[in-house]
Amino acid sequence: MNDYMQVRFDVEPCSEMATDVLAAVLAEIGYESFVPDERGVTAFVPQGKYDETRLKEELSQYPIGGVSVTYEATFVAGRDWNEEWEKNYFKPIVVGDECVIHSTFHTDIPQARYDVLIDPKMAFGTGHHETTTLMLQAILASDLTGRSVLDMGCGTAVLGILARMKGAASVVAVDIDEFAVENAIENIRLNHVSGVEVRLGGIEALKQESFDFIFANINRNILLADMHAYVACMKRGSRIFMSGFYVEDIPFIRAEAEHLGLRFVGYAEKNRWVAVEYMSD
Ligand code: SAH
């Protein structure tokens, strides 16, 4: 289940825009993580979602003219992938000078007010991805004292854990992926935080309940499909932060949010990724 294909894409001529566009194209067909460099990008897709015909088709329609993309795929067993990730990609990260995210295998850890321990395994959410950073910054900037929080699409539960450390009264963390749920529980335990309830599922895991703050870092299409259910869990004055999409997706998110009666508060951007904030009146 945790087996992945690691696909190396060489992009010629290579530019940040070319690799960004490529990552966006790949994200549409199930690719989950991207490690760009000066010659292209290395991307990971769950083995079950790796479809070479589809990949060739997408590459033949690659939207930037004059750019050639070649690739080579290798199979990576789940366990090796974890080790690979831990060794190469996950370094301690400091967000907003106030929060450090690191793993049990790190030894040189910067000091910060909030110290979050994450062993990511196959779950998403180490703080390295722009969207996680944007959401962590939103949490750092919010007064969560005594508030109820929903961490929708929790991955490692990094957002929920920080929310509790910042004084949230209770956190519900939900993820559709079994592995993420398992990892979330493990990370909550590692940080000795109480009051975080983890649930497996999507919107059907939400009950008739309301939250003061909702953090949903998933992706454009899931947010568009499920936002109505998140809004049903908001009351007057509740805030929702959504991320997992690009600046150019804002109009779609905005149209749905306004259709559901939310009021736009603001947005933050990092490398074209955004996090938007809405409020319920
Ligand atoms: N909250 C973390 C992880 C974000 S990754 C962070 O900010 O870094 C997005 C997560 O959403 C993944 O773990 C994925 O399994 C989960 N997910 C995908 N579709 C979902 C859905 N429909 N409902 C709930 N979670 C979903």
Image (cartoon, rainbow, N blue to C red):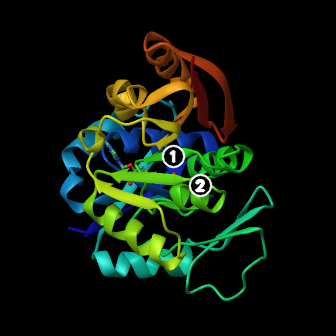
Give the percent coordinates (x, y) of residue 112.
78, 70
Quarter of the figure with residue 142: top right
From this view, report whether residue 146 is shown above or below residue 247.
Answer: below
**Element type where label 1 sits in the image:** strand
Please state which amino acid type lies under the numbered disc 2: Ala
Real-space Cα distance between discs 1 and 2? 8 Å
From this view, report whether residue 170 is shown above or below residue 152.
Answer: below
Give the percent coordinates (x, y) of residue 12.
54, 48
Q: Is residue 276 left or right of residue 222?
A: right
Quarter of the figure with residue 237: top right
Residue found at x 47% / y 62%: 195
Residue density around tag 1, few if under 14, some if 14–19, many if 20 or more, within 10 Å: many
- In terms of depth relative to the viewer, which is nearer, 75 or 48? 48
Residue density around tag 2, few if under 14, some if 14–19, many if 20 or more, within 10 Å: many
Q: Is mark 2 within 8 Å of ligand 1?
A: no
Residue found at x 26% / y 61%: 178
- In terms of depth relative to the viewer, which is nearer, 240 or 91? 240
Give the percent coordinates (x, y) of residue 232.
38, 26
Q: Is tag 1's residue or tag 2's residue first in the polypeptide sequence? A: 1
Please state which amino acid type lies under the numbered disc 1: Val
- Tell me the quadrant of the picture where the C terminus can be found: top right
Q: Are marks 1 and 2 in contact (CB under 8 Å)?
A: yes
Residue found at x 81% / y 61%: 97
| Tag 2 residue | 163
- In terms of depth relative to the viewer, which is nearer, 43 or 220? 220
**Element type where label 2 sits in the image:** helix
Residue found at x 31% / y 34%: 208
Q: Which mark is residue 260?
A: none
| Tag 1 residue | 149
